[in-house]
Amino acid sequence: MTINTDPQKIDQLLTRGVDEVIDAKNLRNKLLSGKKLRVKLGIDPTSPDLHLGRAVPLLKLRDFQELGHQIIFLVGNATGVIGDSSDKDAERPMLTHEDVKENMKKYVEQAGKIIDLDKAEIRYNADWLNKLGYNEIGHHADAFSLHEFLQRDNIKKRLDAGKRVSLRELLYPLMQGYDSIALEADVEIGGTDQRFNLLAGRVLQEQAGQEAQDIVMGNIIIGTDGRKMSSSWGNTIKLTDTPRDMGEKIMNMPDDIVPVYFENCTRMPQELIDEVFRDADPRYHKLILAGVIVNFYHGESAACDIKDYLQKKFVDKNLDVSEIEEVEIHKCERLDSLETVSILMVRKGYATSKSDAQRKIEQGGVKLDGINVSHGTKILSEDDDGKVLTVGKKIQIRLKCTK
């Protein structure tokens, strides 16, 4: 495949959804030279489903692929066991090999929604990391000081707060860095929270006599609860979500993060995005975004259907009662074990957090069959089966009790 050296496309690759490039000048020159680069992205199988936060670096990997470069989708079946704490304010627990094996069953298939698998290298880092011994690990560790690791923002905050930092966590950057040696990577893609790990690849490559990889760091995507989108926190829009779930989560997201999603989670041309935002109605912005996202992951037919549904439910506000989403609540006979209304609202994406849900309840914005829900009300008893829960003026769900 011929390498595309169009300067405009290269500049877009290095800027759209990108927070930092190391070394930007060097990488741009390589891209302009027509050299075929080996571009690496590693994702640990910490949960069974990829989500839009993971899709951001995958879309950047696709950008490199469309210019003709050799992309490498690396499944971290060894690093996933150890666990990366780069984005966490507490120690990430170790996963078992069985957990990782189960989680990664459909990772490649899901990645194939974004990249062309036929033209990609699919690799697994247990193939080389599990063969290393103390001699090699000690050699890699010698390239770093403990002080460098402890100065990382999240690690320093945990130590200052008196929280535990395990020695195991020091291994992760060495493992990710060695991946770059094993794959002879020219470029590695990752998020800004991965900065230390990405730079570790450069250090270890130079130690091994390889040329240091360049780094492209993408923006971090906010999830449905206001924190970084993460499977650990359950605040995700998953690639495996149904069109309706995708669309409703997007329609319920805060208005101010919609432009971020357009830039990072789509490849809609900027001039068309600008055209969308000439309309002042944030519901219209979300409607278009939902259509673009659903079209990408589920196809044009699903996108047309979901836009019609969302238009009626969230914009026209005249959703026919037969189209109201039905939500099952289990164990109705045990009132002491039922979820509160606020927890249900967060779970379904109708509130960003329990406090946000409770605020909406206190303001009288949540009703059960037209009657205001009191703060702390529990649902559901058998008498509430079939009732309609309304959140604000736009969201209606029919509650169904199952035992």
Image: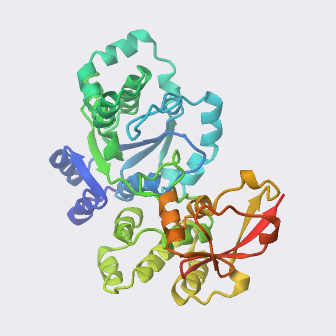
Is 393 placed above or below 115 here?
Answer: below
Q: What percent of the width, then of the height, locates residue 266?
A: 41, 67
**Colour approach in the figure:** rainbow
| Extreme residue toward the left, this view | 25
Is 131 placed above or below 400 here?
Answer: above
Depth check, front residue: 286 or 273? 286
Image side of residue 252 versus residue 336, left or right: left
Is 15 placed above or below 214 here?
Answer: below
User: What's the residue at 48%, 79% (across, down)?
Assistant: 287
- Residue 366, by quadrant, is bottom right
| Extreme residue toward the top, this view | 135
Depth check, front residue: 33 or 144? 144
Depth check, front residue: 208 or 166? 166
Image side of residue 326 versus residue 263, left or right: right
Q: What percent of the width, then of the height, locates residue 320?
A: 68, 88
User: What's the residue at 64%, 59% (across, down)?
Assistant: 340
Which quarter shows the N terminus? bottom left
Depth check, front residue: 354 or 125? 354
Is 378 placed above or below 86 here?
Answer: below
Image side of residue 174 versus residue 225, left or right: left
- Residue 136, by quadrant, is top left
Which quarter shows the C terminus? bottom right
Q: What percent of the width, then of the height, locates residue 48?
A: 60, 46
Tell me if residue 258 can be seen. Answer: yes
Tell me if residue 353 can be seen. Answer: no
**How many labels, in total?**
0
Image side of residue 49 versus residue 156, left or right: right
Q: What percent of the width, then of the height, locates residue 4?
A: 30, 59
User: What's the residue at 74%, 76% (across, down)?
Assistant: 387
